[in-house]
Image: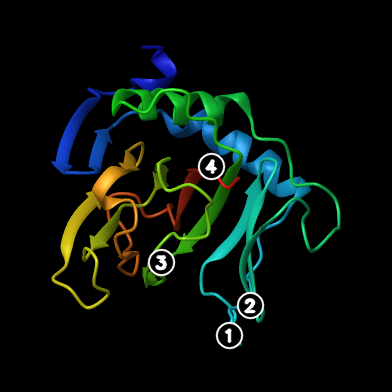
Amino acid sequence: MADLFSPLTPHKQEIAPGLTLFKAWVNGGEFIHTIENILNISPLRHMMTPMGYASKVAMTNCGPFGWASNIQGYQYLPTDPLSGAPWPDLPELFSKLAQQVAAEVGLDNFQPDACLINKYEIGVGMGKHQDRDELNFHWPIVSLSLGLSAVFQVSGNQRNGKNFNILLEDGDVLVIHGPARQFFHGIRPIKADPMQPNLHHRYNLTFRKAH
C-alpha cells in the first residue's frame, strides 16, 4: 500500500455484515488540498430540502454526476445548478481510494461517477436517511472522514430502530455495502476536540455509482 494511504497503522475491521471500516487508511493532507481546489471551482452551499429548509451541512460535488437537493426532491445532475457548468472532474486520487477499498470487500470494478463533499461545522449533524437515489444498489457507498471525529449512527431497516454507533476519525474509510447498503444512517452533531483547538470542521466524502 502506498504511503499516502498508510500514515499510521491502517487496519480493516468488519463492524457488521455490510459495514467495513478501514481505520487510519489515508493521510488527509493531499486530500484536503485537492478538496480546496474543487471548492474553488464549485463552492460549498446549503442546498434546499424538499421540506423547504436549507440543509445544515454545506455540500458540493465532483465527478460526472453530482447529488443535489431542492424543493422538487433529490437527484443526480450532470451540471452544477449554481453555475450551469459540469461538476469538477473526479480526481484520480479519489477514485483510486474508492476502488481500492471496494475491492477489499469483494466489489471489484467499482467505478464511482459521483463524489458528494460534505462539510460539518461544530454542532452540526445529519438526520438519519437512506441512500436510495442511485440506480444500482449492488455498488457500495464509500465514505472518507477527514478532520474532526464523528459518530456515525446506523439503525438498520427502520429509521427509529436501535442505533449502532461507529466512531469515524480522521483518515477512516467506511464502506457500506451488501445487506447494509440501504440501512438508515446519520451523523450525531460534531463536537470540538480540545486536543486540536484550531480544528473546526469535518469533511466527509462519499463516493457513489449514480448511473
Q: Are dots 3 and 1 in contact, CB under 8 Å?
A: no
First-in-chain label (4 vs 1)? 1
Write down the residue under mark 3: 122
Distance Cα–Cα, label 3 vs label 2? 21 Å
Q: Is residue 167 left or right of residue 62?
A: left
Distance Cα–Cα, label 1 vs label 2? 6 Å
Give x and y (percent) for residue 131: 43, 59
Write down the residue under mark 4: 209
Look at discs 4 and 3 and give the one toward the viewer: 4
Q: Is residue 190 above or below residue 96?
A: below
Q: Is residue 149 above or below residue 14?
A: below
The residue lying toward the viewer, choosing from 180 and 94, is 180
First-in-chain label (4 vs 2)? 2
Write down the residue under mark 2: 48
Q: Is residue 172 above or below residue 201?
A: above
The amino acid at mark 4 is: Lys
- Where, quadrant-wise, is the C terminus in this rendering? top right
The secondary element bearing badge 4 is classed as: loop
Give x and y (percent) for residue 9: 22, 22
The secondary element bearing badge 2 is classed as: loop
The amino acid at mark 3 is: Ile
Look at discs 4 and 2 and give the one toward the viewer: 4
Write down the residue under mark 1: 53
- Where, quadrant-wise, is the N terminus in this rendering? top left
Look at discs 4 and 1 and give the one toward the viewer: 4
Q: Are dots 1 and 2 in contact, CB under 8 Å?
A: yes
The amino acid at mark 2 is: Met
The secondary element bearing badge 1 is classed as: loop
Q: How many marks?
A: 4
Distance Cα–Cα, label 4 vs label 3? 29 Å
